Image: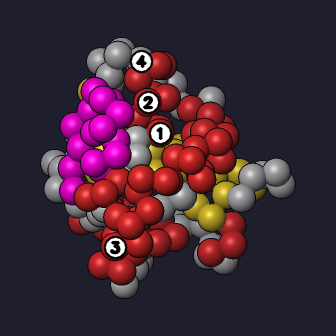
Amino acid sequence: MKARIAEDYNATAGIYDMRYREEQQLKIGFLLNRVRLRDGDTIIDAGCGTGILLEAASEKAKAWLVGIDSSIGMLREAKRKGIEADLVLGDIEKMPFRDRVADAVFSVSVIQLADDPGQAVSEIRRVTKEGGAIAISYLRKAGIDPPRATGIRAAVHASETMKDIFITGFRED
């Protein structure tokens, strides 16, 4: 299934922003308003797509930005935009990063595509520093319960006007 999803995103990468940019910016704004970013932070966008969140985060703080996505086409679109970020081809359920490396980890409308959304959230926790921010959204229509991971203190926000359910909080040990 993951290979098919990556192929689908590869095929539509060139038109993704035209279709979804405005919707994604609303979700990203919702999350960024709940997470304090500081200069010098390390920020990971797990499922970065074309880099819409990375662009917005770069306007909030002078941070080290890292995007990971399973679609090479989406990463190429992010690179084409000239975003100052390290872009990594990889799987949100097995991220190739050290433990506790990020001050903040975001994942916007991605975890519902994971084989195991709980594993994706556990990976997000693993790469987040103690006390680091975690901000996740997933499509309401996916019909999944909010994935939980031990060691994350978070609140769930369900917006009536947006398509996603939002989880914001921080890693605790």
CB atoms of marks 1 and 2 within 8 Å: yes
Indicate which label's residue lies in the foreground, 3 or 1: 3
Earlier sequence position, callout 4 versus callout 2:
2
CB atoms of marks 4 and 1 within 8 Å: no
Q: Position of residue 15 (x, y in %)?
A: 49, 53
Earlier sequence position, callout 3 versus callout 2:
3
Indicate left or right for 19 with 74 as reference: right
- Identify the residue under disc 4: 61
Q: Position of residue 47 (x, y in %)?
A: 39, 55
- Identify the residue under disc 3: 7
Give the Cα distance between marks 4 and 2: 11 Å
Please check the rendered image and state whether residue 37 is part of the magenta-colored stretch, yes or no. Answer: no
Label 1: state its secondary structure: helix
- In the displayed structure, 76 sits above or below 30; it is below
Q: Position of residue 120 (x, y in %)?
A: 38, 65
Label 4: state its secondary structure: loop
- Identify the residue under disc 1: 52
Q: Which residue is drawn at the image coordinates 40% and 35% (left, top)?
A: 54
CB atoms of marks 3 and 4 within 8 Å: no
Q: Which residue is drawn at the image coordinates 67% and 58% (left, top)?
A: 164
Earlier sequence position, callout 3 versus callout 4:
3
CB atoms of marks 4 and 2 within 8 Å: no
Three-letter amino acid code at the position of disc 4: Ala
Give the Cα distance between marks 4 and 1: 15 Å
Instruction: Give, as a single range, the part of the protein colored magenta.
Output: 75-89
Mark 4 Cα within 10 Å, few/some/many (few <14, many 20+)? some
Q: Residue furthest right?
A: 160
- Identify the residue under disc 2: 55
